[in-house]
Amino acid sequence: MTTLGFVARQHIFLPEDREEKGNAIAGFVLIIPLVFLVLFALISLIYGLHIRFLAEDAAFEGAKAGSLSGGDSVLAERRTRDVLAMAFKGEYCANPDITSQLLPDEGIEVSLHCPAHNSSWFGTSLPEVTVSAYAHIE
């Protein structure tokens, strides 16, 4: 009794195979720009969110200072301007538009608008930031 068997031809890939030579470099060259694009987009997003959080914090600090002084709008705007100056050190939001108003429900609201700013990062501009914060007068 005999069995017919098929012998699979084995192909051993050696470094000198001409088909595979250079594929790793070509893959690297195609993928690395995408990796850097995603990386820089992520860094820009994080930086934009950082700026927004600093602006929100400055508006809240101003509203809190105004509420603790009994609703003094001038003090609220000055405190907001001081916190912005400490946070950004003149790099961004150098001329903010800050308004404060007393609200009928015994509170003070501080609104802050920072215009767009050209960054040194690849010639991109940072976004406009508009935030507001509220504090109850104590």
Image (cartoon, rainbow, N blue to C red):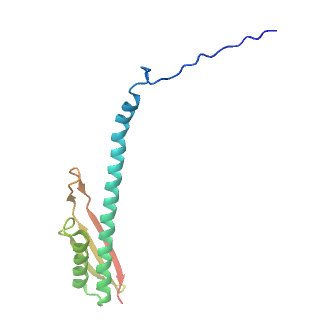
Q: Quadrant of the C terminus?
A: bottom left
- Count of numbered circles on the image: 0
Residue 96: percent from left, percent from top = 20, 70
Residue 42: percent from left, percent from top = 36, 53
Q: Is residue 102 left or right of residue 23?
A: left
Vertically, is 116 above or below 109? above
Res. 23 image quadrant: top left
Residue 60: percent from left, percent from top = 33, 77
Q: Is residue 32 left or right of residue 75?
A: right
At a point 24% along the width and 74% down the height, the residue shown is 86
Q: Is residue 77 left or right of residue 3?
A: left
**Residue at the limit of the structure toward the top, as seen here:** 1
Looking at the picture, tell me which residue is in the foreground, 24 or 95: 24
Res. 17 image quadrant: top left
At a point 38% along the width and 27% down the height, the residue shown is 22
At a point 54% along the width and 19% down the height, the residue shown is 11
Looking at the picture, tell me which residue is in the foreground, 3 or 128: 3
At a point 34% along the width and 62% down the height, the residue shown is 49
Residue 112: percent from left, percent from top = 26, 71
Vertically, is 90 above or below 124? below
Vertically, is 16 above or below 77? above
